[in-house]
Amino acid sequence: MSLSIGKTNEVTPAPKKGVMPAKLAGNTLWYIVVIGLSIAMLFPLLWMITIALKSNNDIYKIPPEFWPKEFHLENFLLGAQSINFGQLFLNTATISIVNTLGSVMSSMLVGYGLSRIRFPGRKLWFYLFVGSMMLPGIVGLIPLFHLYSDIGWYDTWFPLIAPAFFGNPFYIFLARQYYMSIPTSLDEAARIDGASHWTIFTRIMVPLTRPVWITMIIMSFTASWNDYLNPLVYLYTDSKWTLSLGMATFAGSFAGVATTKWNYYMASNLLYMLPPLIIFFIAQRYFMQGLGSLGNSAREK
């Protein structure tokens, strides 16, 4: 007779009564709240789409009809023609692209210098950049207006483009924090092989920091695309206007609220919203990684 030592059978305790129903109820409540908030946030956009597809008379029906009976797709063409959409779109795209390139490139270079190059006063400069974010942009509006007017830049695109090439404090902060999370051993190995700072920046840092500069591109392009104050202050000739100015004067070009062609206005607004939305949806994964890296580096510090 052989004796065998068997393993003790572990009996898992049964879940307490009421735990699973309570968890299910909590999850259900959570989903209901999230779905309700999503609908509340999307409802204005959906209502905007329905107005863009209606005739102007159908907009004022009481009770209002959410879903149009007839789709007036010609509203997009007629609304665009009402404000010379093509010219304004080209102006806005040119300014936004140049602004994005200038702000991202300059901010990435300054962030690299503050994080990887040791020089006297490096921390002081970083604190100055961070501290400048506390100042509202309206503070320098009047001095800059006098400056640009004196050098002959009024009614040109230069006041809208030139400041971007001097860096953005928030983008510099974002780039610097991301650079600090990259081991310096990569720089040291590259310098041993004879690489310069420019080579390290372009061939090592730029590929490794893809999430952060894609985040900058999205934020910079969106901010420049939606900028209203600066074009309003510096641009006088309507052929140089941006879409933000054109859309702001759209409703005011008619005699009153009752005669305002809101279907044209909403259709033009949807076209105006498309480029930033397309860019965001294409690069949203990198956008979330870039913002997440900022939080991780802050916790590490």
Image: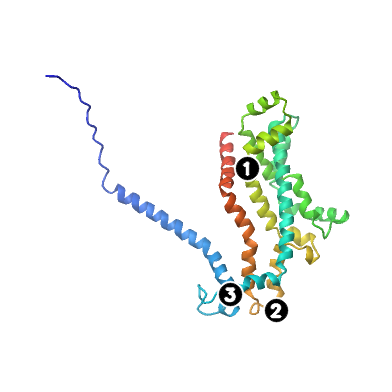
Which quadrant, please, contains the C terminus? top right
Residue at position x 70%, y 26% in the image: 191
Q: Earlier in the sequence, mark 2 or mark 3?
A: 3
Residue that badge 2 annotates: 255
Residue at position x 34%, y 51% in the image: 24
- Closer to us: 203 or 258: 203
> Around disc 2, counting alpha carbons within 10 Å, would you say few (fewer than 14), some (14 to 19), or many (20 or more)?
few
Residue at position x 79%, y 59% in the image: 234
For mark 2, give the secondary structure. loop
* Label annotation for residue 212: 1
Q: Is residue 44 shown left or right of residue 172?
A: left
Kind of residue indicated by mark 3: His
Residue that badge 3 annotates: 72
- Residue most toward the left? 1
Kind of residue indicated by mark 1: Val
**Circles 2 and 1: CB atoms closer than 8 Å:** no
